[in-house]
Image (cartoon, grey):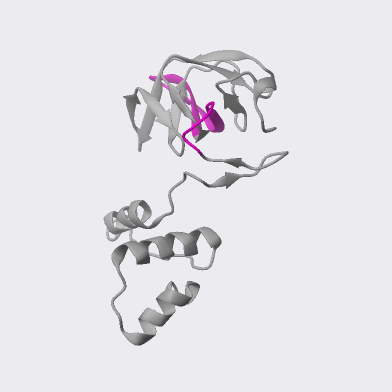
Amino acid sequence: EAVAETSDALMEAYLEGTPIEDDALRAAVHAAIRSGAIIPVLPVWPLSRVGVPALLDAIVDGSPPPIGRPHATEGAPLVTTADGPAVARVLRTVVDPFAGHLSIVKVLAGQIASGTPIHNARDGSAERAAHLFVLRGKQQFEVPVLVAGDIGAIQKLAHAVTSDVLTEAPVNSLDAPL
């Protein structure tokens, strides 16, 4: 009902009792979540893992895709896109006893491949994304590339701290201010 209220066509089909196609419903759910019209609530009990698989499935299937999502910047918003130079924000920095210093990043645009030279927007320092990881709990899986929308970790960045913006192109060559 709440999803049908966000679209006149869906509301008409709902009130007439006409079946709504899965693709149309999924698109309406994504749009409603993105606009804030609905906020899904799923009960879970993590101690016994009741509802956790259903929650994870709902996040994967029901959440809007990250591509096309705008992010606030000092100037014009930066839109998540797989095209153009890589841009990533450092969400957290941690020290792992086995892997060393890890910078947990969210890739906002482009893609970061293993071995890619990256630049820190805060101080202009140049570094190299030597090893890329996807974190799953306490486990780390090395991956060759992180693409727009991915959250992963970059090992042993010397100058990056939490909230830094990392770019593939030098900061003065980007179109949008960060």
Residue 145 is drawn in which quadrant? top left
- Residue toward you, 9 or 159: 9
Would you say 33 lies left or right of 74 here?
left
Name the quarter where the C terminus is drawn.
top right
Would you say 163 lies left or right of 151 here?
right
> Can residue 43 be seen at all in this image of the molecule?
no
**Residue 92 on the magenta segment:** yes
Q: Which residue is rendered at x = 43% and y = 72% of the image?
A: 3
Residue 123 is drawn in which quadrant? top right
Q: Which residue is rendered at x = 33% and y = 60% of the image?
A: 45
Where is residue 87 drawn, in percent x and y? 55, 29
Q: Is residue 74 above or below residue 167?
A: below
Where is residue 8 drawn, in percent x and y? 47, 76
> Can residue 176 be seen at all in this image of the molecule?
yes
Q: Is residue 59 above or below residue 28?
A: above
The boundaries of the magenta stretch are 81-106
**Residue 18 on the magenta segment:** no
Name the quarter where the N terminus is drawn.
bottom left
Where is residue 117 drawn, in percent x and y? 52, 14
Magenta-drawn stretch, dominant element (helix, strand or loop): strand
Q: Which residue is rendered at x = 30% and y = 80% of the image?
A: 18
Residue 61 is drawn in which quadrant? bottom left
